[in-house]
Image (cartoon, helix red, strand yellow):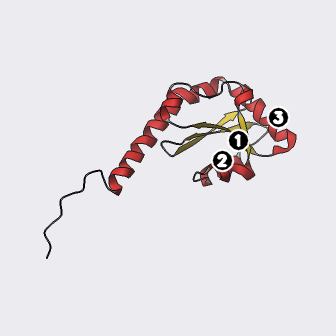
Amino acid sequence: MSPPQPPRAGGGGGNSSAGRAQGSQLAQDTLEKVFKPWCKQRAAQLFRFAHRRFSAGDGRGGIIFQFARTSDAADGRWPTDEAGWRYLPQRSIGSLGIKTNHVLSAVQRYSPQQQCVVIVLVKEAKFDRFYFLNAP
């Protein structure tokens, strides 16, 4: 029988999942405190932007905001006007490189005449969130 091995430094799978969970929680908290209130303030403008794209033939989809790091969201680093916003049709949601089932479900079930979907991605935390915003 071989002698017991000391634990390895640097963390195994458990530590990386714990770190990812902490990163996801931080991303979620940050988005709820900083980004979501901005979305609510701009709900009418976001809805009009999405509805124009839907009506122009892009079909169902969502407005995408992507952050490299959670700190980018915390610092308010996102495009604040329509020129910098990106609408992604439902057929292209899979290109985001995330586990898209819940995002696709949101895009499939919203009412384009009454709501829009804002999709937020935080690459560092491998985190995504979506918000439904109602028409004004």
- Residue 75, position in %: x, y? 51, 25
Quadrant including the C terminus: top right
On-image quarter of the N terminus: bottom left
Mark-to-mark CA distance, 2 and 3: 19 Å
| Foreground pick, 3 / 14 | 3
The quarter of the displayed image where residue 2 is located: bottom left
Real-space Cα separation, disc 3 to disc 1, in angstroms: 12 Å
Q: For the view shown, which residue lies furthest in the right direction? A: 56
**Element carrying mark 2:** helix
Upstream in sequence: badge 2 or badge 3: 3
Q: What residue sits right under mark 3 in the picture? A: 52
- Give the numbered dot on residue 82: none
Label 3 sits on a secondary structure element that is helix
Disc 1 from disc 2: Cα separation: 9 Å
Which numbered circle lies on residue 106?
A: 2
Q: Are marks 1 and 2 in contact (CB under 8 Å)?
A: yes
* Residue nearest the viewer, comparing 13 with 10: 10
Residue 53 drawn at (x, y percent): 81, 38
Q: Which residue is mark 1?
A: 62
In the rendered structure, the answer to whether residue 114 lies left or right of residue 118 reads right
Mark yes or no: residue 136 visible: no
Instruction: Indicate whether 81 appears above or below 6.
Output: above
In terms of sequence position, does the residue under pointer 3 or pointer 1 come before the other?
Answer: 3
Seen in the picture, residue 42 relative to 26 is either above or below; the reply is above
Q: The disc labelled 2 sits on which kind of residue?
A: Ala
Type of residue at label 1?
A: Gly
